[in-house]
Image: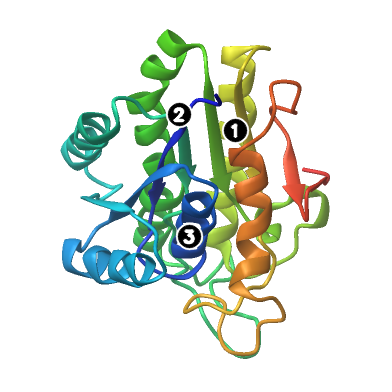
Amino acid sequence: MAETRTALVTGGNRGIGLEIARQLARQGILTAIGSRDITKGEEAAAQLIAEGLEPAVVELDVTSADSVLDAVDKTRHLFGRIDILVNNAGILLERSRDGTAGNVVQVPIDKVFECFDVNTVGPLRLIQAVLPGMLDEGYGRIVNLSSGLGQLSEMSGGHTAYRLSKAALNALTRTTAADIGQGNIKVNTMCPGWVQTDMGGEDATRSVSEGAETAVWLATLAEDGPTGGFFRDKKQIAW
């Protein structure tokens, strides 16, 4: 009989994070929704419960080391361990209709630090909290949600804070995978594309289900699956 796996999804109360939690739970994976606002997390969980799923909810602010440790402890208490970590929580602070938001001259430095704290350091806090347990178990899947805006090979202007934070998240992915080495702990990052969420907006071209699909695939990779890669639509892309 296959072993039941467990997962923690940050920012799991809405958008892509909620859809990742839904798709993982549908596969029989015990899934905890991490939400900064516990009430919103419980409301999101109620949607999945109405679908016949059984998610857990943990309060989780990725910018707080204490909150991260507490959420990880609670998830382990519920499930016994954490097999899968999906670092989905993220922010985009620079918005404009003409695409000029947050260019390098205009971007406030405090916004750069704020983006890094959520989009880059937050995932690092979670990785440091869950990785020792994964190493002890000899199994783990870490999925970082990045963006094409952080892709150096196609880098353009604008959205400076967000681009920097996601490029750094890609570097964190490569560094973590290299530090762990080959084995049955896989660390990858993915670009969901332009998705119809609060962040992506109503003009986005991809559904939430499409945006979540590659993250779920990476979260459930077989032992011979890739590590240290950047993916879109289940295909590796350039950094």
- Is residue 206 found left or right of 54 in the rendered image? right
Q: Residue at x 65, y 12 (%)?
A: 183
Closer to us: 52 or 116:
52
Q: Position of residue 65 (x, y in %)?
A: 22, 36
- Is residue 235 found left or right of 126 in the rendered image? right
Q: Position of residue 85 (x, y in %)?
A: 45, 37
Q: In the rendered structure, are the residues bearing label 2 and label 1 in contact, judged by CB atoms less than 8 Å apart?
A: no
Q: In the rendered structure, are the residues bearing label 3 and label 1 in contact, judged by CB atoms less than 8 Å apart?
A: no
**2 or 1: mark nearer the eye:** 2
Q: Position of residue 189 (x, y in %)?
A: 64, 42
Judging by the rendered image, the residue that carries numbered circle 3 is 22
Disc with the residue nearer the chain's start (3 vs 1): 3
Judging by the rendered image, the residue that carries numbered circle 1 is 173
What separation in Å lies between label 2 and label 1 (alpha carbons)? Answer: 17 Å
Closer to us: 226 or 77:
77
Q: Residue at x 62, y 68 (%)?
A: 209
Q: Residue 217 carries which label?
A: none
Disc with the residue nearer the chain's start (3 vs 2): 3
Relative height, residue 58 to residue 176 (above, below): below
Q: What residue type is labelled 2?
A: Asp
Judging by the rendered image, the residue that carries numbered circle 2 is 83
Q: Which residue is drawn at 52% across and 24% down?
A: 140
Characterize the local packing of mark 3: few (<14), some (14-19) or many (20 or more) Cα atoms within 10 angstroms.
Answer: many
Q: What residue type is labelled 3?
A: Arg
Q: Which amino acid does label 1 sit on?
A: Thr
Q: Residue at x 24, y 49 (%)?
A: 60
